[in-house]
Amino acid sequence: MSSDYLPFHSNPSKPEFKVPAGAVDAHCHVFGPAAEFPFAPERKYTPCDASKHQLFALRDFLGFERNVIVQATCHGKNNDALVDALKASNGKARGVASVGADISIEELQIMHDAGVRGVRFNFVKRLVDNTPREVFFNIAEKIKPLGWHIVVYFEAPDFEDLKPFLLELGTTIVVDHMGRPDIALGVDHPQFQSFVDFMAENEQIWSKVSCPERLSLSGPDGYDDVVPFSKLLVEKFPDRVLWGTDWPHPNMTSHMPDDGMLVNFIPKIATTETLQQALLVDNPMRLYWQD
């Protein structure tokens, strides 16, 4: 484990908010165990082990029924740990893989059969090396016959440059963590409003309204400064938003969030049962379990 890496919370609280029946944690990860699934040599960090068994136990403890497991950069393009977790989930997990340009149709089909329904393109420079965009276009063409979508992770300063590229991919795009807006600028700042306009103009764009712990400046007492951003997207685009814990919270440096407290964040941003049902059940089920 990297010397500055913070392990996940060992004793999260029981949430006060009871999620609706069938709720999906639509953004989480598995790391290793490294003895069975070694981390990638090119990784930018070495995490603690965070096994499928620990993830599923947390799912049950928090009251969720299903998971969407996203391939982590520490495993690179080797999706073995992800596929193993999907197979062990008894149909209660779907996955988002990370693949290279040389991925074959046969390999994609094997992952599809295991439960993968999307690929992730990461543009966060501190986490991954630069990849030519032609590679992403090539991958996008390969996954279209499977009906997969694309999850993209970027930071707000890179958004304007990425806009045309995202539309050229020609499939459903799910943006991680609202594009990581600068909370200090406020919800009405042109930076975030540009993202809102982008979603309004392009119905294939979805957003995860997750990870207030990564964005907040006010801290873990409630992450209240992030609420206006997430709430706006949930209310404006109720059928195109997802939520997830981001367990086991890789590369958090300020603090390690209590997953129970993160669940209590949900009713602050989805303030009615109708919005909660869409965010936690209907939307992820439509995107990941429609077949």
Image (cartoon, rainbow, N blue to C red):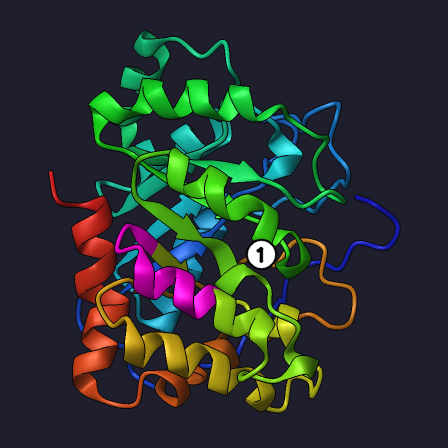
Tell me which segment is drawn in magenta: 195-205
Q: Residue at x 28, y 71 (%)?
A: 237
Q: Which residue is drawn at 68% across and 70% down?
A: 256
Q: Which of 269 and 52 is in front in this view?
A: 269
Q: Residue 177 magenta-drawn?
A: no
The residue wearing badge 1 is 248
Q: Main secondary structure of the magenta part?
A: helix
Q: Where 179 falls versus 220 (above or below)?
A: above
| Label 1 SS | loop
Report whether 221 appears left or right of 271: right
Q: How crowded is mark 1: few (under 14 residues within 10 Å), some or many (20 or more)?
A: many
Q: Where 97 falls versus 222 (above or below)?
A: above
The residue positioned farthest toward the left in the image shown: 291
User: What's the amino acid at mark 1?
Assistant: Pro
Report whether 153 appears left or right of 137: right
Q: Residue 203 magenta-drawn?
A: yes
Residue 153 in the image: state x and y as whole percent. 55, 48
Residue 280 in view: yes
Q: Residue at x 45, y 24 (%)?
A: 137
- Quadrant (top left/top right/bottom left/bottom right) for the N terminus: top right
Q: Name which quarter of the figure residue 125 lies in.
A: top right
Residue 223 in the image: state x and y as whole percent. 59, 85
Residue 86 in the image: state x and y as whole percent. 34, 36
Q: Nearer the viewer, residue 32 or 103?
A: 103
